[in-house]
Amino acid sequence: MSLSLNECILLLKEHHLLKSSAVQNNVGTEMTGIAHDFKQVSGPTLFFCRGAHFRPIYLSMAKDNGATTYVAEKPYVEGNGMNALIVVNVQKAMAILSAAFFDFPQDDLFVIAFTGTKGKTTSAYFTRGILEQAHPKHVALSSTIERVIGPNPDQRFTADLTTPESIDLFRDMRAAVDNGMTHMVMEVSSQAYLKNRVFGLTYDVGFFLNITPDHIGPNEHPDFANYLHNKLQLVVNSRKVVINAETAHFNEVYAAATTTTNPDSIFLFARDDFKLDRDDVKIDFRFESLGLDTTASTFKLIPVTDKAAALNVGNHYALSLIGDFNESNATAAVIAAGLAGVDGSKAAPGLAHVMIPGRMESLAVPGHGTVFVDFAHNYGSLKALFAFLNREYDGAKLNLVLGAPGDKGVSRRAGFAKVINESVTTAYLTTDDPGFEEPADIVAAIETGIDHDRVAVKTMLDRQAAIAAAVRANGPQDVLVVAGKGADTYQKVRGVDTPWAGDLTVVKRVAAELEDEV
């Protein structure tokens, strides 16, 4: 892979990003590396000065390591002697130049993208499960949990971000293509658009699942309007669009989709009994729950319109991942597969056995009820989870182990208190990726909104101790939810990914101790 200085200049001009350039040598000079981290610079490299924590010394170090050109929003004396490309927005420039450096790998992949406050990961895994049935070892994944860029175990990596930085994303896409992948399923967060990580990227199919207030705070979106605006960018940048018609702000979502997509290429889905409050738009797919318990669920997908019937995905489907809310995610996945050319006969077996690390994993603990470990990490996802558990465990006490991340998602804390007041008997407030905030302050922000006359609250900042106490205190008919971290094996503490045993591992350890004590 390489990119010439001249190509950089032309691309930046084409996208109206270039303010000025200082060329020290021939514009035909090739750069064989691209990086935003000086530690990844080796040889003639295109280096980006980006991020709130960028320091000019990083440019000096990149130069020492061989970088020949830098891209920044202002000149730096540390870059004297280097080619300088001064741009309007360095994050947008990085996305555009990264795609070009890796020779536009997205053009060789069928890319399916999901956005939504909840359900992105589940929908992405369901979709990949179906596509893998039809195209074994040819489906890449970019998700909150992991990145899969090839068929071999050493081509799977733990994810750092829901949507990687643009250089990393296009590098993954290029590796996926080189490894024989033909499809990619990806989650696209609102932060990806806020930070311009996917600027210029167009998806073959884009999904808008839902939206509720989230990711609003000092280090994220300033308000809900900004959050919604960034979410909407996915439907604006998709060739075909699929929308959950039950989402809040449906009219805004649909209007955004129609600005760039013909209505014939926009598909809507909803439950069988949902009524849309407008007559000019038809729902294309309906799904009907046929059976649901604590081990499996079955549902029927019904094409309603001619364009829906043409995808040939109407069928009965079974899920191993419990929760009626997952039927909506599964419906999205089946439609995604249909738009990728996979019919219902292949979609059903591909979907049936998909399990997702950290999503509704359960363990029956003799004498101490049932424990669920789930990634649910905002009001909407917890509300849906507890609504399901209330139906399936009628009359059971629902207990919860929960924390909140630091430095982001500040708006979630009030939402956590609200859902605790609505559904929880005993809440164990603990630590969950505190970052640079004090865990006690985060917990206090949640506790402030809890009705102590209704809910028993126990604060235990040691997450392992909190889980142990909650499992031991859980009654024989009680249900305990350990929420927030899912399959994560680290805690983010003051900039360091501190090893964490994992919620389910701790639950199993406590269960084993209880068994030994009998």
Image: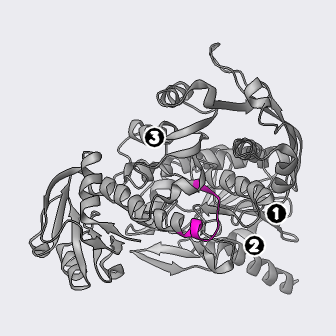
Label whose residue precedes the other's in the sequence (1 or 2): 1
The tag earlier along the polypeptide, 2 or 3, is 3
- Tell me, yes or no, if residue 175 can be seen here: yes
Q: Residue 342 placed where, x, y %?
A: 78, 47
Could you say where residue 368 lies in the image, as x and y percent from the top left? 82, 68
Q: Name the residue under label 2.
A: 472
Q: How crowded is mark 2: few (under 14 residues within 10 Å), some or many (20 or more)?
A: some
Asked if disc 1 and disc 3 are in contact, CB closer than 8 Å, the reply is no
Quadrant (top left/top right/bottom left/bottom right) for the C terminus = bottom right
Please indicate whether residue 55 sits to the left or right of residue 421 in the image.
Answer: left
Q: Name the residue that disc number 3 marks.
A: 233
Image: 33 above or below 422: below
Q: What stretch is highlighted in magenta?
A: 175-186
Q: Is mark 3 on a helix, strand or loop?
A: helix
Whether residue 467 appears in magenta in the rendering, the answer is no
Q: What label sits on residue 402 in the rendered view?
A: none
**302, above or below 52, in the image:** above
* Residue 187 against residue 298 in the figure, above or below: below
Mark yes or no: residue 394 visible: no
Residue 185's quadrant in the figure? bottom right
Q: Position of residue 480 (x, y in %)?
A: 74, 61
- Separation of disc 1 and disc 3 at Cα? 41 Å
User: Circle 1 is placed at which residue position?
Assistant: 370
Q: Distance between the residues labelled 2 and 3?
A: 46 Å
Q: How crowded is mark 1: few (under 14 residues within 10 Å), some or many (20 or more)?
A: many
Task: Inspect the image, locate mark 3, and give the three-letter code of the amino acid beneath it.
Answer: Gln
